[in-house]
Image (cartoon, grey):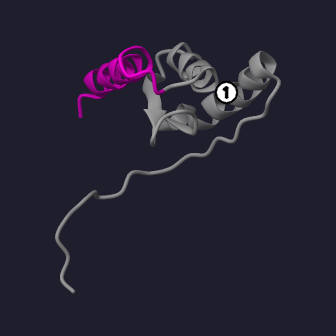
């Protein structure tokens, strides 16, 4: 896929949620900023869920996922004084019709 474009759209989406809709918060913005500035291994990062705190989702090259997780945990705690929980996941097939 065109992961560079997907990442740019994720980043733009976060900016819109933060600035246009004001549903982000400082803690989420720190995580997103850390991920977005990690390096070329990260395509994009954004708030996910209902807003006002919660979770981020980051599209990262698979072989750099654990390195990113350790970086986020260390840097987030250094910046906020709070630990964060990070985990790696794999996308599912998405919505589709199934036979019952």
> What's the magenta bit mostly, secondary-structure-wise?
helix
Relative side of 12 to 2, left or right? right
Q: Is residue 68 magenta?
A: no
Relative depth, front residue between 48 and 38: 48
Q: Residues within 10 Å of mark 1 (few under 14, many from 20)?
A: many
Q: Disc 1 on helix, strand or loop?
A: helix
What is the x, y in percent for residue 28?
58, 26
Q: On screen, 9 above or below 56?
A: above
Q: Residue at x 21, y 86 (%)?
A: 100
Q: Which residue is mark 1?
A: 72
Q: Residue at x 26, y 22 (%)?
A: 5
Residue interval drawn in magenta: 1-23
What is the x, y in percent for residue 72?
67, 27
Relative side of 96 to 21, left or right? left
Res. 60 visible in picture: no
User: Which quadrant does the N terminus fall into?
Assistant: top left
Relative depth, front residue between 95 and 40: 95
Query: Splitting the image into 4 quarters, where does residue 29 fall?
Result: top right
């Amino acid at each position: 896929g065109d992961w560079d474009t997907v990442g740019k759209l994720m980043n733009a989406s976060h900016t819109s949620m933060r600035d246009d809709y004001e549903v982000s918060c400082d803690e989420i913005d720190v995580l997103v900023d850390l991920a977005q500035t990690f390096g070329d291994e990260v395509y994009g990062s954004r708030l996910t869920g209902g807003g006002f705190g919660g979770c981020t989702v980051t599209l990262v090259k698979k072989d750099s996922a654990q390195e990113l997780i350790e970086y986020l945990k260390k840097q987030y705690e250094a910046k906020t004084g709070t630990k964060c929980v990070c985990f790696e996941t794999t996308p599912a097939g998405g919505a589709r019709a199934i036979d019952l």
